[in-house]
Amino acid sequence: MTLAVFLNVTPDIISTYMEVEKLKNLLEKVKSGEIEVSDALQSLRILPFEDLGFSKIDHHRQLRTGFPEVIFCEGKTDKQVAQISERILNAGHPLLATRATPSMYEEVKAIQSDARYNELGRTISVLQTTHEGKEGILVVSAGTSDLPVAEEAAETAYMMGNSPERLYDVGVAGLHRLISNHEKLLQARVIIVAAGMEGALPSVVGGLVDTPVIAVPTSVGYGASFGGLAALLGMLNSCASGVTVVNIDNGFGAGYSASLINSLSYT
C-alpha cells in the first residue's frame, strides 16, 4: 500500500506539506505490528496542512471530524476560491463552498465541470463520493425571505450524506400553514428552523415535537430587528424545551449540527 493510498491524498500534496520520513516510519511500525492501527490513525489526526501562502488548507479535517474543510467565500477573490477548491478536490474530498457568488462558481466550474451551484443558498458543491441519502432532517423557513439561509442549511445537510426535506413559508403570521404539516414535523429526527423578524417560529415548533430543534435567526426584518439580533435574542429566550440556537444567518452551522445529530440514528 502506497503512502498516497493510505492517506487518501495525491503524492504532490504529500510532498508539499508532510514530513515523509516520519510517516514512512509510522507505517513501517504499523506493518511490523509495533504500533496498532488505531494508534497510527490517532497520530495522523494531527498531521499538518497544505500552505498556499494566502490559505492553509486542512486536508485532514475529514479524518478528525468526519467532514472536510468548507470554504467560506466572503472576503476571498474568485481565483482564491478556485485554487482552494482545486486542492480540496485533488485530495479526493467533497467540496462545499458557502456564500459563493456566480463568478466564483464559474471559476470552480472551469476546473470541475460537474460543480453544482445553488443560486438561492449561494453554495458551490461537488460530491466525489456516493451520496448516502439519510432521511430525518427537516428544514423549515418562516418566510420566503428566509430561504437563502434555509437553503444553505439544506445544502450542507445534503453534502454530509442526508436527504433533507423542506417546509417553507410557514411562519407564525399564518400558523395554520404549519399546523397543516404537523405530520411532517413529527416524522423528522431533527428540525432546522430559519426565521427573521421576531424569530418566534422555533418556539412554536419546539412545543409540537419531541426531537431537537435547531433555530437559525436570519437578518430579515425591519429596523428594530437590528439585522437579526431581535430574532437571535428571542430564540435564546425560547420557552420551548429542546431548542438550540446558532448564529445569525448561520445556515451552514445549523446544517452541520443537524447532520451530526441525524447520523446518531444510523449508528
Image: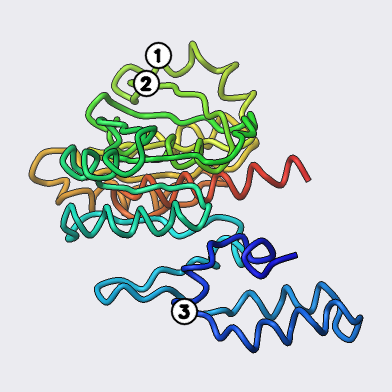
Q: Which residue is mark 1?
A: 177
Residue 202 position, x and y percent, is: 43, 38
Which mark is on residue 17?
3
Q: CA distance from mark 1 to mark 2?
A: 5 Å
> Quadrant of the rendered structure where residue 169 is?
top left
Category of crowding for the residue at label 2, using alpha-carbon neighbours closer than 10 angstroms: few (below 14), some (14–19), many (at least 20): many
| CB-based contact (under 8 Å), mark 1 and mark 2 | yes
User: What amino acid is found at the position of numbered circle 2 in the picture?
Assistant: Val
Report the residue at 42% width, 29% height from top.
Answer: 140
User: What amino acid is found at the position of numbered circle 3 in the picture?
Assistant: Tyr
Report the residue at 21% width, 38% height from top.
Answer: 106
Q: Of 206 and 52, which appears nearest the observer? A: 52
Give the mark nearer the N terminus: 2 vs 3. 3
Q: Which residue is mark 2?
A: 170
Q: In this rendering, is residue 57 above or below 120?
A: below
Report the residue at 18% width, 37% height from top.
Answer: 102
